Amino acid sequence: MARQLYTEKGDKKVDAKLMKSLTPAQRKAFEKADEKHRKVKYQDQDTKIDKQIIKKIKAKPNGKKSKGKSKNKRG
């Protein structure tokens, strides 16, 4: 199977499928990160990057960025 070249139209379709499970706040975070990531030549490369972005967003509560170390210190 030949690799598909990256196109804006094709990317919108793939992004829509990937964003189905996201909340509105997470969607905003995804769209912001999607605009920032490097441009690619093939659609499968873009999809791989998008999946990594979604995985990071879902791992964080409410789609917020992690600020490093926790402020709560024990003891």
Image: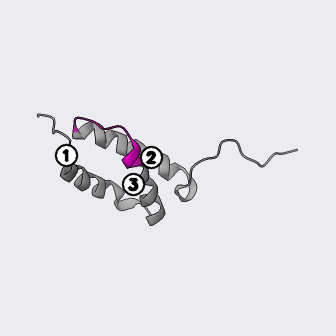
Residue sitting at 48 percent across and 52 percent down? Answer: 58
User: How far across and down, in percent of the image, does residue 74 sit?
Assistant: 84, 45
Q: Is residue 41 left or right of residue 22?
A: left
Mark 1 residue element: loop
Q: Earlier in the sequence, mark 3 or mark 2?
A: 3
Mark 3 residue element: helix
Region in magenta: 33-42
Q: Is residue 59 left or right of residue 36?
A: right
Mark sitting on residue 55: 2
> Alpha carbon of mark 3 to alpha carbon of mark 2: how far?
14 Å
Magenta-colored stretch includes residue 36 = yes
> Alpha carbon of mark 1 to alpha carbon of mark 2: how far?
23 Å
Query: In the image, is residue 1 above or below residue 62?
Result: above
Q: Is residue 12 left or right of residue 24?
A: left
Query: For the stretch drawn in magenta, what is the main secondary structure?
Result: loop
Assign the N terminus to one quadrant of the image: top left
Residue sitting at 29 percent across and 41 percent down? Answer: 46
Mark sitting on residue 31: 3
> Alpha carbon of mark 3 to alpha carbon of mark 1: how far?
16 Å
